[in-house]
Amino acid sequence: MLQSLKRDHCRGNEELARHYPDLQVYGADKRIGALTNKVTHDEELKFGDINVRCLFTPCHTVTHMCYFIWEDNCPDAPAVFSGDTLFIGGCGRFYEGTADQMYKNLTQILGTLPKETKVFCGHECTVTNLKFALKVEPDNEAVKEKLAWAKARDDKDLPTVPSTLEDEFDYNPFMRVTEEPVQKFTGQTDPVEVMAALRTMKDNFKKPKETLPVPALLALEWGLFRP
Ligand SMILES: [Zn+2]
């Protein structure tokens, strides 16, 4: 079950299909290698007791699909496999889409799922995401707590995935585009404009230690000394 046609998600499909000729490969983009079942928005699939609802979330790629999963007669919370759309504390880059699409993805498609839904994202970039979140909202206690927790997990080589949707609304700036501190930070009030500004700022976000002071950068550029 594939979310994206990008190679970091579907590399190796063809080889798997060679080893397992009956393999069923689900996805929304016919360019996904060895694809056998093309799925569409809101389509529901059943694998034994496991139910899957396909959620079309274009932006990182034009055919990105998230999968909402729950099990019959099971007390556990449902899960969403959010791929390159929603990360813990962040969201995917807008490679093939717009801020308007990501806003809809995060608020109308994923944001309306049950609050207790566990979020399993496609990449582990929680600490970097939360460092940016702290820059956006330095007074947000939920950001501080989650960042300290994520750093501790990272130090022990333990995963930070999953979180829950409810938690994401507390510390993920991309889920908080209608909150005043986030609007203030971006200098925008329209939620889609806030989303666009946040993404641009995050794309340019560097940890302070990695950035040389401006005079040093200029000196390098002018060839005054070698790095
Ligand atoms: Zn990816």
Image (tube, rainbow, N blue to C red):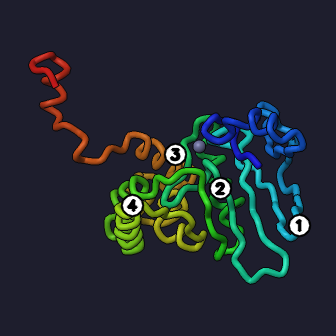
Q: Position of residue 221 (x, y in %)?
A: 20, 20
The quadrant of the image that shows the C terminus is: top left
Residue picked out by circle 4: 154
Residue 174: give x, y in percent of width and height.
52, 57
Residue lying farthest to the front in this orientation: 19
Q: Residue 196's mark?
A: 3
Q: Residue at x 81, y 34 (%)?
A: 18
Residue type at mark 2: give it.
Ser
- Is residue 184 visible in the rendered image? The answer is no
Name the residue beneath numbered marker 2.
82
Relative horizontal placement of residue 83, taking residue 1 as reference (left or right): left
| Dot 2: element | strand
Question: For this view, does 50 lie left or right of residue 104?
Answer: right
Q: Position of residue 173 (x, y in %)?
A: 47, 60
**The residue tagged with tag 1: helix, strand or loop?**
loop
Q: Nearer the viewer, residue 142 or 37?
A: 37
The mark that comes first in sequence, 2 or 4, is 2
Indicate if the residue with disc 3 has its beta carbon within 8 Å of ligand 1: no
Q: Nearer the viewer, residue 23 or 109?
A: 23
Answer with left or right where residue 54 lies relative to residue 106.
right
Q: Quadrant of residue 131?
A: bottom left
Q: Quadrant of ligand 1?
A: top right
Q: What residue does disc 1 label? A: 48
* Residue type beneath disc 1: Gly
Q: Where 25 sits versus 81, above or below?
A: above
